[in-house]
Image (cartoon, rainbow, N blue to C red):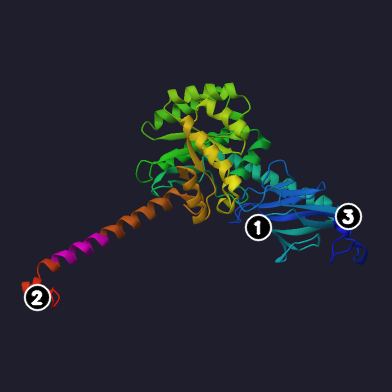
Amino acid sequence: MNSQLAGSANNTTSAQPDDPPGTWFLDGSTDVEHSMNLRVELRQFPFKVGRGVGLSLTLDHSKVSKLHAVINQEGTQIWLQDLGSKNGTRVNGRRVTDCVRLRPGDDVQFADMHFQTRHERVGDKARIQQDSRAAASRAALDLKQILATGDIVPHYQPIVRLATGDRLGYEVLARSHYRGLREASVMFLAAQRLGVEAELSELCRREGLRQGKTLPGRPTFFINTHATELNHRPFLDSLREFREQNRVTPIVLEIQEREIDDLAAIRDLRVLSRGFDLQLAFDNVRDDPARLRQLLDIGPDYIKFDIAMIHGIDQASPQDLRSLKSLVDQTCHSGATPMAEGVERHEEAVVCRQLGFVFAQGHHLGRPMRGADIVAEHVKSELQRSTDSAAIEQTCIVNSRLPAKEFPRRNELATPRQR
């Protein structure tokens, strides 16, 4: 047995019977708003959980550590171990400080992300496979319907200037009404199975810009791209079409840093995008000075630093702060604008501004909202401002009409000694 498991003070396999043979699952959501229902089969062990890429279960949330926890199997039992995560792992509300055996129905919490363990016996495997195939088939049909009807529900997350709090614009995020396909990551997973990631990406951009025309002011729209379309002619044609249909709208193309393999191709795209009057941002840039220099040589307009570098920055060591400050300064000196992603607390925003970040986004600065909700919020704010202005004006009029005796004479304001 693994020595770490054997060392658990309160859980020993010798004192507890094995579970029946079968398959283990984690049921839950990959976002805190529970809009993405998910069932994950624990196929291979160790089963690693965290925010990093290439793990058994990747949770894209700022409070989840890059390598958060691991689940191991001993016989038919499964055991959970926290890997020194910052925000902890809990089982049924109790923080995990050692290896804990998991049982069917346990509530497992990775930071703010909740899952429940499920155990299906061997005899139920055929039914599980049938349910899985049915869910995948349903998702494929729903996605085809989305592509045919354009039934995307864009959400817009504010991008804010840290020095003033003014909004530069919004990142356009894709959502849908279809249960099981409400978030972009799930839609693109279904699109990958059908080989239509590029078509879905174009639809998300098109609807995001179209519905974004109703937003107040003249915001800049940060629109996302997908790796499968970057080197294809239809993508360039679609960019030309977007610009023709949105001649005065400031648009920034976002490219994921991890998707940039062919630097020459991205450099060519940069030249073409300038011809279309489009700006360029590299997203999820990590703490890698050499990689940052490669990206800056391409000439982007914005560098969006990864959420992992921003989360808890107010509690970072002086050495880590100096390292990040150096990257921010390097970005500024190149002519690009540094942006912080995932700012969720006031203290993080303060430190980001001190380090030289110009813009930021995150739940502390504004959650993703539908365009209609942003417009309604703006109208409400303008009405309140108008009401306040009218009240102040009325007060001034009333005061100007008061008789002279109502106002104290100058000598009445003087102290007895001054008189």
Q: Quadrant of the C terminus?
A: bottom left
- Measure the alpha-carbon separation of dots 1 and 2: 68 Å
Q: Is residue 361 visible?
A: no
User: Do tag 3 and tag 2 residues touch (Cβ < 8 Å)?
Assistant: no
Looking at the image, the residue that sits furthest to the front is 417
Judged left or right of residue 221, residue 295 is right
Residue lying at 55% horizontally and 41% vertically, measured from the top left: 305
Q: Quadrant of the N terminus?
A: bottom right
Please give the residue where the numbered disc 3 appears in the rendered image: 3
Crowding around mark 2 (Cα neighbors within 10 Å: few <14, some 14 to 19, many 20+) is few
Residue 181 horizontal/vertical position (percent): 61, 47
Q: Is residue 55 visible?
A: yes
Residue lying at 14% horizontally and 68% vertically, measured from the top left: 398
Helix, strand or loop under label 2: loop
Check residue 394 for magenta coloring: yes
Please give the residue where the numbered disc 1 appears in the rendered image: 87
Amino acid bearing label 3:
Ser
User: Do tag 1 and tag 3 residues touch (Cβ < 8 Å)?
Assistant: no
Judged left or right of residue 52, residue 166 is left
Q: Earlier in the sequence, mark 1 or mark 3?
A: 3
Boundaries of the magenta span: 387-397
Crowding around mark 3 (Cα neighbors within 10 Å: few <14, some 14 to 19, many 20+) is few
Residue lying at 39% horizontally and 55% vertically, measured from the top left: 377
